[in-house]
Image (cartoon, helix red, strand yellow):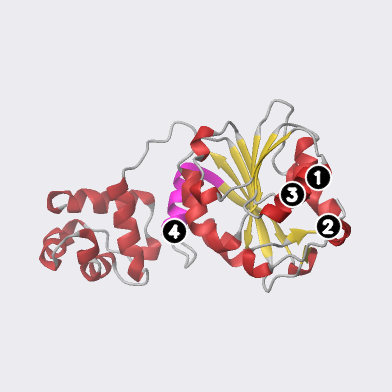
Amino acid sequence: MDVKKVLKKYNIKPKEYRDQIFIYDEDLQREVVGFADLKEEDKVLEIGSGIGNLTEYISRICPVVAIEKDGKLGAVLSHLGIENISLLQRDVMATHLENLEFNKIISNLPYSISTPLTFKLLNLDWELAVLIYQKEFAERLVGEPGTMDNSRMSLKVNYYCDSEIVKKIPSDRFFPEPITDSAVVRLKKKKNVEKKGSRFWKIIKAAFHHKRKLVKNSLKDSAQFLNLDEKDVKEAEERLPDKRVYECTIEDFETIEAALEDFM
């Protein structure tokens, strides 16, 4: 799709502050969709479909449920008459995605809601996702323990998924041009992974409030967040990993949860 031509035809002036940025390079549009390895039997969820520059290529292969919050952009997509799509004009964060039928996700994500939307997607059942993020966010998303990119999000993403950055996209490949480069992340959901409870992820969130500190010190500083007293953490101190928070793995946090279990 020739993005600039379509926007001009319908007198649409995209607003970057509303996350309205589009890949205008048609070869790149096809390449992004290609990372999802689509088959005729797949069903795709696309979030932030805009005017359909990715939707068009998805729909040539398999059905797509396209979610677009902006009524003007949704109207353009409807008017283009692309077949094999179901368009939902609504806010994705207020949508019960679990009620939709899909096994793959492709999205040039609204960057301003990258964190809550990613957490929302991780709680759903799907096979593969191809998601475009700001480059720095993408690097944190796939971060490994022992690096400063390790975070509560990367731990959760890499617990439930195999993750990789499959392509970095310079800012000048978008219209309008954003202030930062972007990256395409491919996530493949792991099978038969034990679901972790909310307490486990809350402990990780608390610890990462002070990711550079030793685990014992970070948890003392975040004790109130966990409804603990500092003395509780001190009592459990000998059973805590002797590491800084950013060095910790999922297994380390399993040890931390077990050490704090009697106090929570």
Question: Whole-Å distance between the Cαs marked 2 and 4?
Answer: 48 Å
Residue linked to disc 3: 75
| Crowding at mark 2 (Cα within 10 Å: few <14, some 14-19, many 20+) | few
Closest to the camera, between mark 2 and mark 4, is: 2
Question: Whole-Å distance between the Cαs marked 1 and 3?
Answer: 6 Å
The kind of residue on which mark 2 rests is Tyr
Residue linked to disc 1: 79
Q: Work out whether mark 3 precedes mark 4 in sequence or the reverse, and give the earlier one.
A: 3
Q: Magenta residues?
A: 152-162
Residue linked to disc 4: 145
Q: Work out whether mark 1 precedes mark 2 in sequence or the reverse, and give the earlier one.
A: 2
Nearer-the-camera pick, 18 or 225: 18
Question: Whole-Å distance between the Cαs marked 2 and 3?
Answer: 10 Å
Left or right placement of residue 27 versus residue 130 in this view = right
Q: Work out whether mark 2 precedes mark 4 in sequence or the reverse, and give the earlier one.
A: 2
The kind of residue on which mark 1 rests is His
Nearer-the-camera pick, 74 or 34: 74
Q: Are marks 1 and 2 in contact (CB under 8 Å)?
A: yes
